[in-house]
Amino acid sequence: MAVTDFPYQTSGDPGSGESSPRALSVRDRVVPPMRGSVLWGWIGPLLVTVFGGVLRFVGLGHPHAVVFDETYYAKDAFSLITWGVERTTVKDADKAILAGDTDVFQKCADGALDQCASYVVHPPLGKWMIGAGEWLFGMTPFGWRFAAAVVGTLSILMLARVARRMTRSTLLGCFAGLLLALDGLHFVLSRTALLDIFLMFWVLAAFACLVVDRDRARERLVDWYETSPLSPQGPRLGARPWRIAAGVCLGLAMSVKWSGLFFAVAFAAMSVMWDFGARRAVGLRDPYRGALTKDVPNALAGLAAAPFAAYMVTWAGWFANATGYGRNWDQAVSSGPIFFVIDSARSWVKYQWQVFTFHEGLETSHPYMSEPWTWPLLLRPVAFHYEGDRTGCGATTCSEAVLGVGTPLIWFGGLAALVALVAWYFATRDWRAGAVLLAYAMGWLPWFYFAIASNRTMFLFYAIPMVPFMILAITLCAGWIIGPAAVGPDGRPTSRRMYGALAVGAFALFTLINFWWLHPVLSAELIPYMEWKGRMLFSERWI
């Protein structure tokens, strides 16, 4: 790893950049030290998280309605925490639930237990998480949105901490967390019982675990380099709990939506490449063979076996309950525990195949569907909720809306930052730029295939796993704009860093203003119709 991996980090916060490459020790080159106060490294991100949490929890139960696809997931979640599997519901179940009646599920007749099973096309974990909120607070809008608000808030803390680790700057970590707190799409999904916010959470958690694992593995490698006899391939690094944790998180991401598989494959490859780079960075003569023989077997356990185990555990309710959809598809004549396991496994595989073919053929038109290449430009947001016949706002006509759209300044700035990151990566091979670009690509580019090959129905909110990495791109660029603390030929500090900090601070301020302006149409605030319409930036596309 070159010193340019942290071009603005060697001392201070965000850094002075005074040390030359020759002056740095192997430890400083391979694992640049974390600068600044450890205490503020937690206090700063926690303060930003509290700010984002207040935004998300205030008025969480409003609107008192079943919003967009909450009609599926809120009921499925309640069924899971009640019976362990999803069941079908009676007619007008949403109206009954909003009126306080939760007895809306079909009864299973004796001898036909599988007839009340609901055919669902997503794995169960996201619905189990939604159900946890319903178990705590009841089958109410607040109850089924509670878990989304929790993971949305925690993701702010997680992003702030991982950005701090990647940049070695508490200030930049807080900047990243603040941007996520102020993103409109993240805000809306944190207040809605859809699955995508849970997918984003587990993907970001996996990425954060791998970044920590990267540092820990390099620290062990440097410890060996400084204290043990050298060898061409280097040592085995022992247990890698953070990599196993990343594998579990990736399995849980796939247990929310299958699109988590794209990240699982990419992150596994990325982690192995980091192992190659670590052994090369300390100057081993045979780093690649060392990584293949000593790191790859560990990676298979952490990033292949662990995700599979985590995915299977989330299906425990389906395996344990005879009323799950397709649970009894395969019924062998013989009986016994061996046949029970074989029958269950064959039934489960058949169900997975049915779900796969459903997604492959999903072409139903929808007024808010959009193509993935339009997502970064926010051309087609999703109207999660709209009521235009309300009164009480001080105008003749009032509107109440929840619009699933990102904060434009973040998304357009993120697009520019990603272009800059591509150029920076090819110029410097900075691992941070490569990791951010890879993660962003896995949240975006696979959808191009489905759009072209099968014309699949897709929506802007599918892009939510991209958002943390878009913000990481902005944060890395912010660090480069601020730059190191430097002195001119006269020995006085240059003004570059001051102007850079002013530019980054102005971006954060304008983002706050942009979010504040959009907030009424993100949170179902009752406003005059003309104010609602004035916030539809591309009226013909946003209405």
Image (cartoon, rainbow, N blue to C red):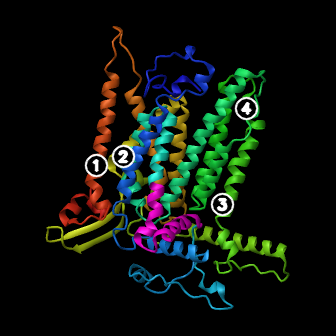
Q: Earlier in the sequence, mark 2 or mark 3?
A: 3
Q: Amino acid at mark 4?
A: Tyr
Q: Earlier in the sequence, mark 3 or mark 4?
A: 4
Q: Contact, CB < 8 Å: mark 3 with mark 1?
A: no
Query: On residue 288, which mark appears?
Result: 4
Label 2 sits on residue: 410
**Residue 339, above or below 59:** below
Query: On residue 311, which mark appears?
Result: 3
Q: Residue visible at 18% across and 67% down?
A: 393
User: Which label sits in the foreground, 2 or 3?
Assistant: 3
530 vs 45, left or right, is left
| The magenta segment | 123-152
Outermost residue, top side = 490
**Residue 288, above or below 188:** above
Label 1 sits on residue: 514
| Element class at badge 3 | helix
